[in-house]
Amino acid sequence: MQTAVVHADESCLGNGREGATPGGAGALIEVEVKGAIERRDLYVHAPDTTNNRMALAGAIATFALLSTKGRRLRVVYVSDSEYLVKGMREWVPSWRARGWKRKGGSIENLELWQALLQVQSGHEVTWRWVRGHAGDAKNEYADHLAVRAAKD
Amino acid sequence: MQTAVVHADESCLGNGREGATPGGAGALIEVEVKGAIERRDLYVHAPDTTNNRMALAGAIATFALLSTKGRRLRVVYVSDSEYLVKGMREWVPSWRARGWKRKGGSIENLELWQALLQVQSGHEVTWRWVRGHAGDAKNEYADHLAVRAAKD
RNA sequence: UGACACCCAAUUAG
DNA sequence: CTAATTGGGTGTCA
C-alpha cells in the first residue's frame, strides 16, 4: 500500500468578527510512488467561515483528492488543529457511540465531520498533531498556502 | 437607611481538577453616604477550593465588611452565580423549612450557607442575578478582582 | 433532564 | 493586550 503524508493548516481572517470572515485551508501532500515522492499543493477558499470549519474543509478536500480512482492509501495527516486531530481520534468515536450528541447540546459542524468520516473511509489514516508556530517547516508552508487562499 | 450596591464574582483555577485548585472572590462595593458614593474593592483568596464555595466566601466577606459597627444597610448584591442568588432567594428558605435537608442527600457547603445567613441578617438584602460575560462593566471588574485574587 | 457558574486545551484572528 | 471557534471536564442545585 502506498503512503501519503499530508501537512495541513487553516486560516480565517477576522475570525469571529462581524461581517464576512474569509477563510482558507492549505495542504502539502506527499505521495510515495515507487520510491519517489510526488509533491502537490492543495488549497481551498471560503468567503465566510470559521477557523475550525476550514480545518475540516481542508481535510475533506485532501481526502477527496487522494481518493480518485478508488485509491486506498496509508495516510499520515499532520495538523496543528487539536479540534481536527482530537476530533477524529477521540471525539468522533465517542459521539458516534452516543448518537452524535455532546454534553452541552448539539455538535457544531456535524455535516462536515460526517463528510470527512465518509471521504476518509477506505484509507488507513493516522491523525498527527503538531504544535503551531513551533518551527515545523512543512506546517509553516501549509500555513502560507492557507493564508494566501483565505485572501482569495 | 443607607444603600450599598455590591457587584461580586468568583474564580477557581482548575475547578474540579486534581491537585490544589486555588480560588478567588472579588467584589466592588459602593455605599451611598450622604449623596456621595464610597467605592471599595474587596477580594478573598483560598488555596484549594471550588467555584461555588468562592461565591459564598465572597458574599460572607462582603457582609462581614458591611456589618462593622453594627451598621444596618439596604444591600443590593449582584452576582452571576445562580448557585448563590437562587440559593439565598429560594433554596435556603426551603432547606430551613425542611430541617436543612435536601432530596439527594446532604447539602454541600452547609456551614458556608449558614454563615452567610448569619452575617447578612440585620441588613435588607436584595439578591440580583446578572448573566456573566454579557458586557456588564461592573461584573467584569469584579471578575478581574476575583481572578487576580485566585492567582494570589 | 435542565440551569448557572468555574475551568482546561488547541487553534484562528484583531 | 483583546476576542471568537470548538472540544473536554467539575461544582452545585431543582
Image: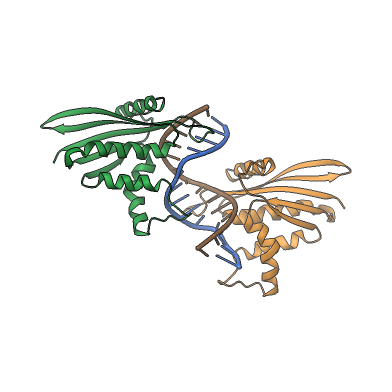
Chain colours: A green, B orange, C brown, D blue
Direction from residue A13 to residue A72 in the image, left or right = left
Direction from residue D6 to residue B67 in the image, left or right = right
Farthest-out residue, bottom: B98
The residue at 66%/60% (across/down) is: B86
- Quadrant placement of the C terminus of chain B: top right
Direction from residue D12 to residue A95 in the image, left or right = left
Asked if residue B115 shows in the view, the reply is: no
The residue at 65%/64% (across/down) is: B111
Q: Nearer the viewer, residue B150 or A90?
A: A90
Q: Is residue A10 above or below residue B77?
A: above
Asked if residue B31 shows in the view, the reply is: yes
Farthest-out residue, right: B34
Q: Is residue B104 above or below residue A109?
A: below
Farthest-out residue, left: A34
The residue at 69%/54% (across/down) is: B59
Q: Is residue B101 above or below residue A103?
A: below
The residue at 78%/61% (across/down) is: B121
Quadrant assignment, res B50: bottom right
Residue B20 image point, x, y percent: 51, 52
Q: Nearer the viewer, residue A93 or D1?
A: A93
Quadrant assignment, res C10: top left
Residue A33 image point, x, y percent: 13, 32
Direction from residue A38 to residue B3 in the image, left or right = right
Residue B76 image point, x, y percent: 76, 52
Quadrant assignment, res A35: top left
Residue B114 image point, x, y percent: 69, 64
Q: Nearer the viewer, residue A93 or B64?
A: A93
How many numbered marks, from 0 up?
A: 0
